[in-house]
Image: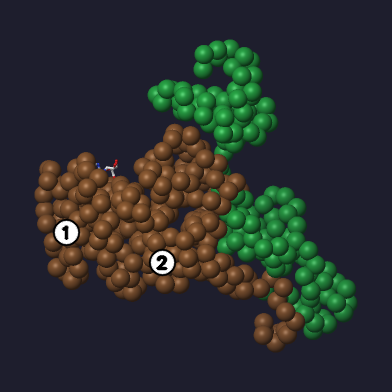
Amino acid sequence: MRTYHQLTDPDRSGLGDQIGAQRKRVAERLAAVRRIVAVMSGKGGVGKSYVTAHLARGLARAGRSVGVLDADLNGPTIPGLLRDSDARRATQESPEPASGLDGVKYVSMGQFLEEGSPLSFKGPTAESFVWRGAMEAAALREFLGDVEWGDLEVLLLDLPPGMQRYIELCDILGNPPSVLTVTIPTPESRDAVRRAMRAAVDHGSELLGIVENMVGGELKGTAGDDLAAEFATAVVARIPWHPTPDTWNRLAAQL
Amino acid sequence: MKFLCVECDQQMTFARRELPGDGTLAATFKCPKCGRVVAMLTNPMETQLVSSLGVEIGGRTVPAEPFEMVRANVVTGGPAWSGDAQERLARVPSFVRGMVKKIYADYAREHGITEITPAIMDNARTELGLEGM
Ligand SMILES: Nc1ncnc2c1ncn2[C@@H]1O[C@H](COP(=O)(O)OP(=O)(O)O)[C@@H](O)[C@H]1O
Ligand SMILES: [Mg+2]
């Protein structure tokens, strides 16, 4: 029997080349984006999306061009935080990002789904564990490579809990994104966020600092300071419940 | 992937790609020497896996469209809303808006309508007896 390389006619399918072309498309699109920042925590419900959206608005108010990619495909909350009217835009027809509050550009799976419906894929559902992860990674790749982001100073990526999406991102981008970490003050949050930060460091991401959210209320602990000391980075903001725009403007000024 | 005609010891050339149904993807290859044609058939799970990679067996003939994978594979559901129709929907009080939207979307689906316009909303209201919505 012959080997693949002994057959010298071109491989018309060229699956490897097709994958390469996809990467090139992402790289070309993002060449006009100065900085890519992943907002992550490794824990759900700590305010990643809330921080991402309000930080983006703070940046936009300071006159900086900013985009938000909602990388939480299964729990998209960015449209609810950024859209300035209740009407849904049919962006599946247009590669332009939606324009949200304070002029923040954003793209989210939420714009593609029927209100309240979970992300699901056409075709047979049998053995979905085999292909579902790949489908989600492909959707993420299209959001990065097909959306006409234009010139951006910062593209913020709102990640779901856990590490999977971050690792996919490193793969698709070819370079690890910078990472802004969000935690709440509790020891439980600290332990979950520590794992996420460890993974970020292991993949070579630059740590931009820690945002400690939901401070000054019932949540007790020193997660922000503990993590900052462990990873030799800074607590760049402590966000109380229902902060004023000033809080976000100050955080934006540090990025 | 490449296909070899073992008898002729000759690489086969890609002929065409089809979706004959049942979630099957068929790619046919032909031996340039003996003319034999073979088809590779994938089962539905394999077809999903190929489409999740955003690649085409046999090679791309046209460059990928924006959101090609999302458009082809994500269940987006619901008809499109024209700008005017969106505005009108936005005037519905928010606590019933979701329900009202669903009524119109269901109406459109039953009537094979792909875009909801104010005129369609009027028709639906009359037909369903929903004056005032
Ligand atoms: N500082 C805050 N003040 C008031 N509400 C907040 C604050 N941070 C988060 N929230 C709310 O808490 C909930 C969870 O936040 P979210 O951003 O969705 O978390 P995550 O994205 O980490 O899962 C949301 O309803 C959000 O609006
Ligand atoms: Mg979130």
**Residue A75 seen in the figure:** no
Question: Mark number for residue B65?
Answer: none
The chain letter under disc 2 is: A
Q: Position of residue B131 (x, y in %)?
A: 55, 12
Query: What residue is pinned by disc 2?
Result: A34
Q: Is residue A63 above or below residue A89?
A: below
Please say if the residues under marks 2 and 1 sit with CB atoms less than 8 Å apart.
no
Say which colour chain A has: brown
Q: Nearer the viewer, residue A250 or B106?
A: A250
Rate crowding at label 1 as few (under 14), some (14 to 19) or many (20 or more) other CA atoms within 10 Å.
Answer: many
Q: Measuring 78% from the left and 63% from the top, which residue is drawn there?
A: B16
Residue closest to the eye, A107 or A187: A107
Count of labels shown?
A: 2
Taking the image as drawn, is residue A255 in sight? yes
Task: Name the outermost residue toward the right.
Answer: B34
Residue at figure coordinates x 60%, y 61% from the top left: B54
Q: Quadrant of residue A8?
A: bottom right
Letter of the chain in green: B
Q: The numbered mark 1 sits on a residue in which chain?
A: A
Q: Secondary structure at mark 2?
A: strand
Q: Amino acid at mark 1?
A: Gly
In this figure, which residue is indicated by the disc labeled 1? Answer: A224
